Image (cartoon, helix red, strand yellow):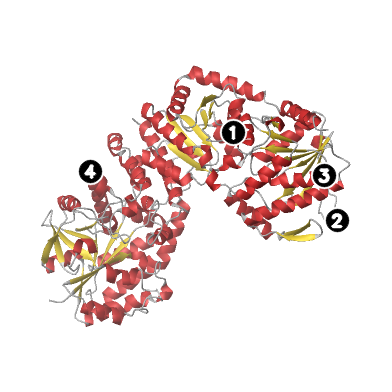
Amino acid sequence: MKKSICLYFQVHQPTRLRQYRFFDIGKDSHYYDDFANRTILKRVAQKCYLPMNELLLEAIQANKGKFKVAFSISGSALEQLDRYAPEVLDSFRKLAATGSVEFLAETYYHSLASLASPSEFQHQVEKHKKHVQDTLGVTPTAFRNTELIYSDSIARQVYDLGFKTMLTEGARHIMGWQSPNYIYTAESQPKLKLLLRNYGMSDDLAFRFSDRGWNEWPLTAEKFTGWLSEAEGDIVNLFMDYETFGEHQKAESGIFDFMRALPGMVLAAGMSFVTPSQAVKNIKPVADLSVPDAISWADEERDLSAWLGNELQQEAYNKLYRQTEKLALIGDPELWADFGHLQESDHLYYMCTKFFSDGEIHKRFSPYATPYEAFINYMNVLSDFIIRINGRQ
Amino acid sequence: MTVLMFGWEFPPHIAGGLGTACEGIVKGLAHNGVKTLFVMPNASGDEDQSATTILNASDVAVQNVSTTVEEFIGKVKFYYVDSNIVPYVDPDEYFAAIEKMKAEGRSQTTVGFGQKFKFSGKYGADLMEEVSRYAQVGGTIAMQHKDEFDVIHAHDWLTYLAGIAAKELTGKPLVVHVHATSYDRGDEKHMDSRVLDIEKRGMMAADRVVTVSDLTRGIVINKYGIDPAKVVTVHNAVDFSGRENIEVERGIKDKVVTFLGRITFQKGPEYFIDAAAKVLKRTKGVRFVMAGSGDMMNRAIRQVARLGIADRFHFTGFLRGADVQKMFALSDVYIMPSVSEPFGISPLEAMRTGVPSIISHQSGAAEVLKYALKVDFWDVDALADDIYALVTYPALAKFASKQGYDEVNELKWNGATAKLKKVYESLI
């Protein structure tokens, strides 16, 4: 059997909060930094989404549909694209129309709802599915959770929501001697098939591509195709943030040229491209995986510590999700929307205090000078939000 | 009678309470018929330029500028020594001031005995260098004006060497004024021995040591070994003239309990947080605010998160100018749980705004405020009790607010400086 290459790109933009002071509590309930959100989204659209979508469309056409990719676009990102860069949505629709692009389901708000509340999780997954249908005209059938967070209990929830395919991280501490380059099943729900990220090869593109200190620099499409050919197993899953192309790895690094050359070389080397849903149809699973404690694709630890690793994050998380029941009773769409945006995992990520090793990555993505500032600002917003909820009871 | 006074800062460009106190003292002395020649190093150099007459001493070694402020009816003269030392300020603020100075190209100035001193902008090492430079300049100024004053008065350790120099050169009596000691800034293990040494030298050389509270008087006598006979307490006062309370629209229905100050060990922030957690177990209609910044801030934030009260306990960061007034105006209870506080002017500010205050017995202010509630800083249960009572029993809050307001309006510098004048008179 031909070896399969599965490319999946994550598109997400957080709804960044404005500087919200104690003095604003109870007076002003607009929480978002619209200017920063618009500016950043427009920049990323120009540098990444538009040129990369065009590149992928050309590659699909040039290879007569044999080049395939998958996307997951969070609801928060879809909202911002609709508001600030609708031309990007048009280009995603064009990609959807080729039939060679699969769009995955996730939580609408890129949240940690899978850990916090089964009902909120279900609500967000269904909201996202419907929004993707309405916006892109396709129905997601495979699932990826926020930051590839996965555990045995999440597997059961995902299957119960109607998905038979799920993506997660090929975390070393879970895999042991096993390779991520096969299809696995969930031990807690054997009918749920798992695709595991090959973090080494994914990060070659996502993190190391432009690193001149890396002994493999410069990475050419030819060299990378060679690695893919040599890799053991049935499938190599290359999962990464879409912003890798043009944003994290700048255009000057040659990342676009690399991606332009890669599809033809992979196909010529006798390998094929698959989307997640096709992969589980074509390839038989080899074993089941037990994951009692949640894993993710973040940081060295590949666990939840990027979002829930310290007491600040846990406090913010607990206080937020404590509102779930009250909100359900009120049923106000405006409060629901704010509740959703406040659930975006990014807000907790900004509070991470793992300053060493991965701290640099956290800092790069944070609008705050310190995790403490992120916490203070978030709690001020949350306090106003809770006052609004209590005022409605 | 005229006093040669060495200070470190003076309004409007002040970083801490020392400048405000000096202004109150100078004004109060003027009211009591005592003239002052006020010498200070100056961080920004643009202070009071509009209201002053600058005399350039072109070839004189000391760059001295004497100025008369109309407000003091010619009783106060200022001598500016350009300096970038602002010891009563957050390091962040300090470095911002240095950057500003560098940008303006004022990196050095001519002072001392015709020498040029390079201002490096460093906080630690150069503070000492500038303190001794200030002593040189102080001595020069004292000699230049030795026929014009009767007593020398130096405020806090930064100016003690200048005071000693002036005394040695002119033979006039020296009063040192202790606004704070090393023992209020940290535990004995972490004290700067050079600062401690200067403090001690100043107190030993002085003919009288004035302390801002009996608490500080005790420290001066017991820790520095100064003869009790020459240590006199003159409690701080506060000048509220021209101050109007601002009106602020409240966005929150809950009662607001406020801590405002540097978030450092000696201010007792952790006791405030623990008390907040206890109060919140009993009542929900209350929020807590910690306004300020400092080296214990991150630890305080973690404590709040760990106790699970972050939705009712808010941090504002460092507050400036009008925001400070706004914070008082939004408060229902003010807390100063200091572990060691020579005086502590902030509860007076709060009470002036009509906010009932709870302060620790370990503060100088506790000696003069009858209508503030008082607890030991470590007694978190008592603090929680008092907070609970003030937010729950309107009669108590109303009483404390009214009485406190009247009380602080009586604490005038005119009275405090009359006592200071007696100290001077005893030396001439």
Kind of residue sitting beneath label 1: Ser
Q: Position of residue A46 (x, y in %)?
A: 42, 66
Secondary structure, mark 3, is strand
CA separation in Å, label 4 and label 1: 50 Å
- Can residue A376 be seen by looking at this rendering? no
Q: Position of residue A188 (x, y in %)?
A: 13, 53
Q: Which mark is residue B67?
A: 3
Vertical comparison of A198 with A368: above or below = below
The quadrant in which the C terminus of chain B is found is top right
Chain for disc number 4: A
Vertical comparison of A128 with A379: above or below = below
Q: Position of residue A110 (x, y in %)?
A: 31, 53
Say yes or no: labels 4 and 1 on the same chain: no
Q: Which mark is residue B60?
A: 2
CA separation in Å, label 1 and label 2: 42 Å
Kind of residue sitting beneath label 4: Ser
- Residue corresponding to mark 1: B346
